[in-house]
Image (cartoon, helix red, strand yellow):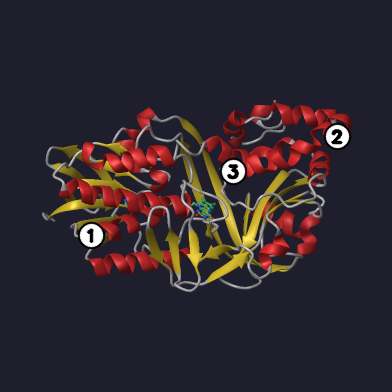
Amino acid sequence: MTKKYDLIVVGGGPSGLEAAKTAAENGLRVALFERKTDPAKIQRACAQMFLMNMDSFYNERMYFSREQRKWVFPVNNFTVDYGGDYREFYGCHFIAPNAEDRIEIGDYEKNASDGGTAAVVFDKGALLRGLYDGGLAAGVDFFLERNVTTVSSDRGGVTIKTSEGDTCTGTFCIAADGINSRLARLSGLNEERTFLFTAGSTSYYVSGVSFDRSEMICMGNCFDDGGLGTVHFCMLPSVYHEDEYWLYIGGDEKLDYFTRKSTFRKWFSGVEVGHKRCAVISAWGPAREPFKDNILFVGDSCWFAEAENTGALLSGHKAAMAVCKALHSGTADREGVMDYISWWRIHFPGTHNYQDFLCYAVFFRIFTEDELNYVHQLITQPLFWSLNPFNLYGHIMQGLKPHMERIQKEQPRLAAKLKQFSPDRAVPMMKPATRAGFPAYR
Ligand SMILES: Cc1cc2nc3c(=O)[nH]c(=O)nc-3n(C[C@H](O)[C@H](O)[C@H](O)COP(=O)(O)OP(=O)(O)OC[C@H]3O[C@@H](n4cnc5c(N)ncnc54)[C@H](O)[C@@H]3O)c2cc1C
């Protein structure tokens, strides 16, 4: 292959496909390399929720237009067509181990009734299919089943090589190769970043689920004295079948305990697992800037764990437009794509602290079973409706604030734990717990 491209995109997830399509639609010669056979075939776990405009996310107020079947990004002024199925849901509940008490994020009843603000679970395969077809129509050269193994930059541009024997050069490259980005490592971007942790996750599509107010995302912990210890779960409706749910839980044994033996077993009857998806995350602190030697980094590749589909589409789009501008103004270098670099710095690390994201994932793990049951019955009113993971922890703390005096009086040990917990405790707690508890709480 000798053709020289304006832009090479590595990775065909939401960020890479959006970048390639946008650049080609705006007149650039684009090649995209993806190691999967079919970019639209989902292999990696994803809950497939789209955050909606109830809360700002990367300073965007994205929403779904049911009429136009589009994801709309009104602040950044672009849309993404979506022809797939979707399923609305109405709240986010943190559920106590007693499977009854809950901290409610969003007013379920109000959101479920006409005029409320619903959130959406979508079919990520359909989203990717639409982006891929749009890229093909715009003239992107797709190279599938290609694993990019090396990248180098010189005055001629950026050259990548694949394990299948391809060599390809572009004036710019967009690295959209996801959370475990090889390009971030090869280009030296990770040398400026702090390694945080590695984590594996398993999720299951399960049927045979039925419980009250079930069109929501719910999260919680239950406790097995028999050896599994704390069992954390997160569950939300599946877009594929009506009685099917996406259940994120730490493996087969925990799935069995949760659905058949725990206090939550009343939610399940004749559980069947449709399919299972996994993900391994190597989490690094955010890059200082999403650029190195004419490689622009987008999506998960330069952030800390998950840019989410919103952040992936946004950054892919913005990076592509910056490359268009750079090439058409004759500044094919860092200065030329400064719009993207500055935008990313302001709207990613400048707006969201990754530790806040991790906080909501680990916060409830500091409590014992009894303490959790106690905490969950304190907040009786629904809290601000948000699915922005960077803000969830803050909303819960706001909800607990008026009860602090009571907690201090009734449960001083619990009050001390609450005071001791801070966002910088979240990273050590992402490391596996031992019998002695989580690393930050020993
Ligand atoms: C358990 C879990 C639940 C999640 N839930 C949600 C959710 O509900 N909502 C949400 O918005 N987000 C969610 N996310 C996050 C979301 O999936 C990611 O943030 C998003 O997919 C990032 O998009 P991306 O394009 O940056 O990377 P990816 O989607 O990871 O795409 C990277 C692509 O690059 C390809 N690739 C990698 N290396 C190479 C190489 N060397 N050569 C060629 N190709 C390569 C891969 O095959 C892949 O297709 C979740 C993630 C996890 C793990």
Residue 284: x, y in percent? 45, 35
Q: Is residue 239 visible?
A: no
Residue 248: x, y in percent? 61, 54
Residue 288: x, y in percent? 37, 32
On the rendered image, what quadrant is the N terminus found in?
A: bottom left
Q: To which residue does mark 3 refer?
A: 391
N-terminal of the pair, mark 2 or mark 1, is 1
Q: For mark 2, give the secondary structure.
A: helix
Q: To which residue does mark 2 refer?
A: 406
Amino acid carrying label 2: it is Arg
N-terminal of the pair, mark 2 or mark 3, is 3
Q: Is residue 58 visible?
A: yes
Q: Which mark is residue 26?
A: 1
Amino acid carrying label 1: it is Asn
Nearest the viewer among 411 and 327 is: 327
Q: Is mark 3 within 8 Å of ligand 1?
A: no
On the rendered image, what quadrant is the C terminus found in?
A: top right
Name of the residue lying farthest toward the right:
410
What is the spatial separation of the Cα atoms under label 2 and label 3, in whole angstroms?
25 Å
Describe residue 299's horizontal placement relative to residue 239 as left or right: left
Q: Is residue 402 above or below residue 425?
A: below
Q: Is residue 31 above or below residue 182?
A: below
- Rendering quarter of residue 118: bottom right
Q: Is mark 2 within 8 Å of ligand 1?
A: no
Q: Are marks 2 and 1 in contact (CB under 8 Å)?
A: no
Q: For mark 3, give the secondary structure.
A: loop
